[in-house]
Amino acid sequence: MDIKQSVRNFGRLLLGKRMIIGKSRKELDKMRAAGELIASVREEVRRMVKPGVSTLELDQAAEKMIRDAGAIPAFKGYKAGDMSPFPGSICASVNHVVVHGIPSTQVVLEDGDIFSMDVAAILEGFVGDTATTIAVGSNVNESALQLIRVTEECLALAIEQCRVGKHVGDIGYVVQQHAQQHGYSVVKGFTGHGIGRKMHEDPQIPNYGKPGTKEKIRTGYVFAIEPMVNMGTDETEILSDGWTVITKDLQPSAHCEHTVAVTEDGPEILTLTKEQKAQRKQTIKVVETVNA
Ligand code: MG
């Protein structure tokens, strides 16, 4: 953290305000490493997703990859308030499960399901957090495929808002607008968040909002942005296990998430694999050439 940032943060502490922790260059490098690791876990698990696989098998594979890399699964044992610790290394949420599904041998993926996986790890003291919704098998109906596509588009639009001078409200606004344009609703009870040494730092990043409102975005902020989009109602319920969040109308829900750093050059997605980063650079180059 540079001196200016330290002073700013200390000032906020004295004023008793909620504090967003800006990251130094060195800290960002560590967050890049954590992000790249968790992205590769996400992609490995994606390749394992097929009909007949239980969500516990996917969880165990993810945990092994995380630990083999010298990292710690951030969800495992996670406690919020008086809740029982989360037992998994991934959140495994199938169809109408919005988020926080508990991995289990009882939950076996079927052809036609949509499977949302959320996974996070702590590497050298810094957290990377990512989620994706995957079509299982080849018989997922077009309406569910569209829900996944639109949720990914919501994430891409949200990431574009992660620029110096924008506001946190701009992020939620674009997510909500895009989802609603397709007749979907956004989940209001769960949000994205700042991220760093802790998985959940300030600010909260709702998937709804008004442009130009809430916290001003500054260089060095790192956000976990995670649209949760429902096909039907935005109302949710929590099952008796205390974790599993479902849609009240049991219609499907999709969830995707990236950890994103705000840099002077714009948003940088930290939760991409090396290959994905190279591909993205290539695409940007092509776009620039076409526009030239
Ligand atoms: Mg998150």
Image (cartoon, rainbow, N blue to C red):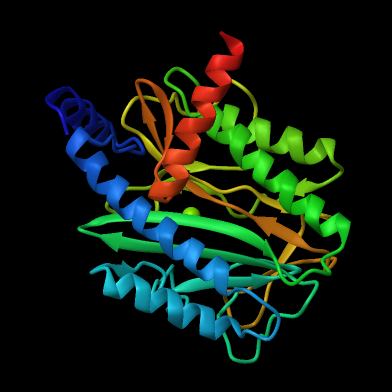
Q: Residue at x 82, y 55 (%)?
A: 231
Give the quadrant of the N terminus: top left
Horizontal side of residue 212 vs 81, given as left or right: right
Q: Nearer the viewer, residue 155 or 11?
A: 155
Q: Nearer the viewer, residue 12 or 220?
A: 220
Is residue 118 visible in the rendered image? The answer is yes
View extreme (bottom): residue:
106
View extreme (top): residue:
292
Q: Residue at x 46, y 23 (%)?
A: 163
Above or below, comparing residue 104 to residue 123 in the picture: below
User: Residue 288, position in %: x, y?
Assistant: 53, 17
Q: Residue at x 36, y 73 (%)?
A: 65
View extreme (left): residue:
3
Give the quadrant of the C terminus: top right
User: Residue 76, position in %: x, y?
Assistant: 39, 75
Horizontal side of residue 175 vs 147, given as left or right: left
User: Residue 184, position in %: x, y?
Assistant: 82, 47
Q: How many marks?
A: 0
Q: Quadrant of residue 241?
A: bottom right
Above or below, comparing residue 87 to residue 116 in the picture: below
Horizontal side of residue 59 vs 274, given as left or right: right
Q: Residue at x 16, y 26 (%)?
A: 7
User: Residue 285, position in %: x, y?
Assistant: 49, 23
Is residue 271 visible in the rendered image? The answer is no
